[in-house]
Amino acid sequence: MVLQKNYKAFLMVCMVWPMLALAQKEVGPYRFDHGPYLQGLTDERVTVYFTTSEKGFSSIELREPNDGTITRHVTIDDGLIQANNTLNAIALKGLKPDTRYEYRLFSTRIKQFRLSRNVYTDTIRTDWYSFKTVNPKAAGCTFVTTSDIHDDAKKYERLLSHTAVDQADMVFLLGDILSHFSREGQPYSSFIDVSVDKFAKEIPFVLIRGNHDTRGSLSRTYDRYIQRPDKHFYGVYSLGDTFFILLDTGEDKPDSHHDYSGLTAFEDYRKEQAEWLKQVVKTKAFKAAKHRIVMAHIPPIKDDGTSTRVSVHGPDMVYKLYLPILNKEKIDLMISGHTHRFQLIEKNKNVNNFPILINDNDSMSLYTVSAKGVHVKTVNSTGEVTMERTFVR
Ligand SMILES: [Fe+2]
């Protein structure tokens, strides 16, 4: 929300803080710890996530290049301006489509939070970063996918170093990015800090949950780190004339499996998504799109009864629940991960009416969608190009 009435008060704070700071004992440099990184970029909004080393009052300055007007944005919840916090997710709303903006973070440490006697100390800010809002009329798009990073930030960094991520409109992290979420801040060290360093200050990422991302004592806190605009891990996304369906395929074994201690309910959750998917394919946005891409961590693979592994359950559920719905539609490509083995399942009439690409656990792909089709170039962590192909519907 743009800070207007409160801006003068905030400026007063900025003028007064050096005097107050003199009276306070220094406790180390105040700093931005993690981020900034972009989430939920559309044609009219984006949310910027970042943390500070101590509690403070944070805001974002926004401007258009070559325009001297700067607006300040904060989060306001139920009449309260968000402050005295370290974790920030500040939405920039009312933006113009297909427009480049510049932003920088601004934060003042709150030494003491008391009614009418708040003590503010250090004020810090970042350099200017930029992003471009989505162009709903764009023909085609460019995006990056990877999966099955399993907390290996070094591998993730290597994959990004071999990929032209700066050309991408969006990065889709296709699940099992964490192995077992059990440590506070784990998403930062496992993938967010590297993302920030390589692209996420200016290009957003979307997390599509894998079965491993659902595991661990803190897996229920994931939305502190990433945005789920509609409160679900499944959803749709549009980049120009390309429509993405993102499925959250849950765990790979039945809910009754002892690994889950009776604390999962993915059977019903997947069915809920099947009903949702039936509605999605009826929407104007889906029908009007020129290109349609489906992403799901667990690929659709039929249980033919020959495997003794209980984990064939998840792929079989994805096969039975979603393929019949998707097979009736004009889908360009489905992209998955999970198996740690590269596989291209070619289009097979009335089985899968579109190709299914399964990413392994050491690859990253750059996709370019255009009138020519969906072009994919895949590299491994040594930089070797392992696949290049254009899928034509
Ligand atoms: Fe998986």
Image: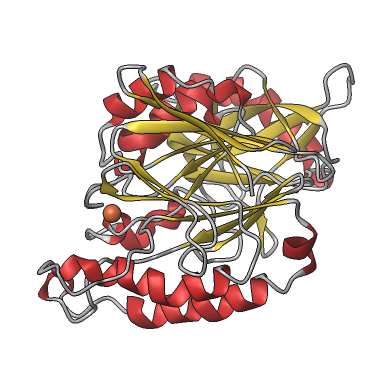
- Foreground residue, 195 or 253? 253
Q: How is the model colour-coded? A: secondary structure
> Residue 303, how many percent across, how many down?
26, 71
Please name the residue shown 31% across and 49% down the image.
176
Does residue 34 appear anywhere in the picture?
no
Please name the residue shown 79% across and 39% down the image.
139
Q: How many marks?
A: 0
> Residue 126 appears in which quarter of the rendering?
top right
> Residue 90, how many percent across, how many down?
63, 45
Work out whether 115 lies above or below 376.
below
Please name the residue shown 76% across and 44% down the image.
240
> Residue 204, how many percent across, how many down?
58, 37
> Residue 254, how many percent across, how many down?
23, 77
Q: Left of 153 or right of it: where is 123?
A: right
- Foreground residue, 360 or 74? 360
Q: Left of 253 or right of it: where is 121?
A: right
Q: Left of 113 or right of it: where is 138?
A: right
Work out whether 124 lies above or below 336.
above
Please name the residue shown 22% across and 52% down the image.
180
> Residue 343 appears in which quarter of the rendering?
top left
- Foreground residue, 146 or 54? 146
In the orientation shown, which residue stands out farthest toward the front?
349
Ligand 1 located in image quadrant: bottom left
Does residue 202 appear anywhere in the picture?
yes
